[in-house]
Image (cartoon, rainbow, N blue to C red):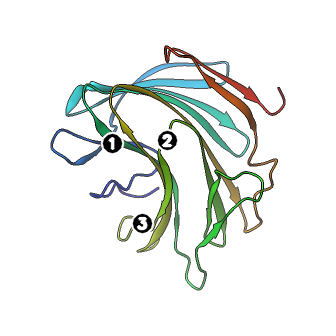
Amino acid sequence: WMADGKNGEVSMNYATKNDRGQWEVLRLYDFKSFDDNIYRRDAVLETNENIKYNLADIPLANGVLRIDRVSVPHPTVIRLGHYTLPKIEGKAFSIEKSKKVSDAVIIGNGEYKLATLPLYGWDTTTIHYPVGLHPVSNQCSLIMSEKAVESTHIMVTLHLWKKGDKEFSNKELSPVKSVKVADDLQSVEVVMADN
């Protein structure tokens, strides 16, 4: 975990460019249910209740699959951050590219590895190195996905983690076989690797 940054750095949460041009994170949540291994919440932006999120998290053995919908009354930009990794003295941050899972963005700090797979709906997924936001070290490493939205939009994101410095296997990076979003944006069909 880390503190939220003024430049839109956000960890395990959404940040939205609000009407004042500032990055604002979600704080107002309404728990909906936890059924069939899916944790559902709704959220609204504190400064504009017309910016609404429907959040669905599916816990996995080494991560979480997020299926989220945002509705905005006017064009804006949103971000979703993974966990952060603190800089460990004497160790360099690592960045990996999977040979078979091309969209995977992977970082490591020598003790842990994180991976983000933007499965649907994102414009970019990038690595950032915030300073002064992490409680363990002055610098940290963070993966964030970003999207310019104009009305209602679906995002499907896979966040994975593992202890140690061993590379993610292709199997670990591929728990999802396919994602199909309905034209009306009211449902998402996900087929896992085990069918």
Q: Identify the element where label 2 is drawn.
A: loop
Does residue 78 appear to the left or right of 156 in the view shown? Answer: left
Q: Quadrant of the C terminus?
A: top right
Does residue 17 appear to the left or right of 129 in the view shown? Answer: left
Asked if the residues shown at circle 1 and circle 3 are in contact, with their CB atoms under 8 angstroms apart, the answer is: no
The mark closer to the camera, 3 or 2, is 2
Q: Identify the element where label 1 is drawn.
A: strand
The mark closer to the camera, 1 or 3, is 1
97 or 66, which lies in front?
97
Alpha carbon distance from label 1 to label 3:
27 Å
Residue at 19% from the left image edge and 34% from the top image edge: 47
* First along the sequence among labels 1 and 3: 1
Q: For mark 1, what is the residue?
A: 77
Asked if the residues shown at circle 3 and circle 2 are in contact, with their CB atoms under 8 angstroms apart, the answer is: no
* First along the sequence among labels 3 and 2: 2
192 or 103, which lies in front?
103
Q: Identify the element where label 3 is drawn.
A: loop
Amino acid beneath label 3: Pro
Q: Which mark is residue 122?
A: 2
Amino acid beneath label 2: Trp
**Residue 36: which quarter of the image?**
top right
Alpha carbon distance from label 1 to label 2:
11 Å
Residue at 76% from the left image edge and 63% from the top image edge: 167
Q: Residues within 10 Å of mark 2 (few under 14, many from 20)?
A: many
Q: Which mark is residue 135?
A: 3
145 or 111, which lies in front?
145
